[in-house]
Image (spheres, helix red, strand yellow):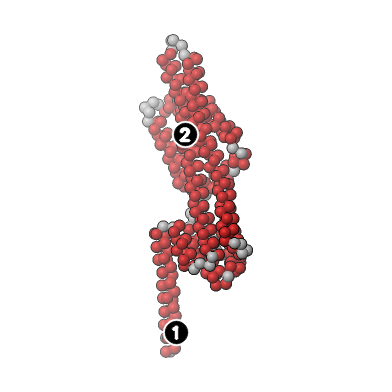
Amino acid sequence: MNISFLVGLLAGIGLVAYGILQSGSSTSQVVASFINFPSMSITFGGAIAATVMSVPIKYIKDVPKNFKVLMKREKIDLGVYIDTIEELAKEARLKGLLVLEEKVTNIELQDEFLKYCVMLIVDAIEPTKVRSQIENEIDCIEARHSSAWKFFDTLGSFGPSFGMIGTLIGLINMLANMNVTNGASSLGQGMSVALVTTFYGSMLANLICAPISNRLKAKHDEEMIVKEMIMEGVLSIQSGENPKYIREKLNSYITYEERGSKDNSDEEGKGNKKDKGKKRGKGRKKEANA
């Protein structure tokens, strides 16, 4: 579960509520000033209605699925992808590209896009056509993903607009009902009610829609990096490049710290193997002497 999103949302709402309650008025007065159901219906209802008119119905149907993606905590380990591609490169170098058809289905890392790319080179398609096909696949994925944040971008853009519409409605009603006897008191009360809709619109756009849209875009960017790296790795395998060179090429997608930690873990693994080999050798010598 993505805790950071929930923490940020609750913190934002909490800080705004704290600022409202510290205005000096009593709690009941503050609540009465900021809770206005007609204003909510104008701002939220109007923004949702305009969004439904603006986007395809598929975007609306995908909202629950997008929320599930938003709340899912998934850390992409690029190092695992690099290890897998290097392993596939070694197999292809020793046994040929055809062996990858079986190898890619038995590896620990199960990625449908990786399988798709590997099958393209197994089928002996020209490298230029393979690159073109993979790039086209990435473009189509990007187009599908963009529907996720376009809904929230559209909803967020309508929020302040309908907040302003609500404010104008409130001002018109206030001026229409103003009279000489209670003009000053009705002016202040009417202005506060009118401006609440602008507040709702700003909250909808900046505390809900914009963060959701930005988080979905960030997840998309992470996934696109992985897919671009897979494309470069698979094309390098098809070209018959050295597996070590392929690893160095793909290492450009990760930080120096991540490369260093990976190298250290590899050295530790080799050291453990050597220690085990020495212990076995000593054990055999003792048995021979006995």
Residue linked to disc 2: 203
Quarter of the rendering occupied by the C terminus? bottom left
Kindly indicate whether the residue at mark 1 contacts the one at mark 2 (C-beta within 8 angstroms). no
Mark 2 surroundings: few (<14), some (14-19) or many (≥20) residues within 10 A = many
Mark 2 and mark 1: Cα distance apart in space: 74 Å
Q: Nearer the viewer, residue 236 or 152?
A: 236
Which labelled disc corresponds to residue 284? Answer: 1
Q: Position of residue 238 (x, y in %)?
A: 55, 64
Q: Position of residue 113 (x, y in %)?
A: 57, 57
Q: Residue at x 42, y 37 (%)?
A: 14
Q: Nearer the viewer, residue 112 or 246?
A: 246
Q: Residue at x 49, y 52 (%)?
A: 222
Q: Nearer the viewer, residue 257 or 279?
A: 257
Amino acid type, label 2 = Met
Q: Can residue 35 be seen at all in this image of the molecule?
A: no
Which labelled disc corresponds to residue 176? Answer: none
Q: Residue at x 44, y 16 (%)?
A: 186
Specify the quadrant of the image occupied by residue 98. Answer: bottom right
Q: Earlier in the sequence, mark 2 or mark 1?
A: 2
Q: Is residue 267 above or below residue 3?
A: below
Mark 1 surroundings: few (<14), some (14-19) or many (≥20) residues within 10 A = few
Report the number of numbered marks: 2
Q: Can residue 257 be seen at all in this image of the molecule?
A: yes
Farthest top residue? Answer: 180
Q: Residue at x 48, y 47 (%)?
A: 218
Q: Nearer the viewer, residue 170 or 223?
A: 223
Instruction: Please identify, in this view, whether the residue under mark 2 or under mark 1 is nearer the observer.
Output: 2
Q: Position of residue 207 (x, y in %)?
A: 46, 37
Amino acid type, label 1 = Arg
Q: Position of residue 180 (x, y in %)?
A: 44, 10
Q: For numbered disc 2, what is the local secondary structure?
A: helix
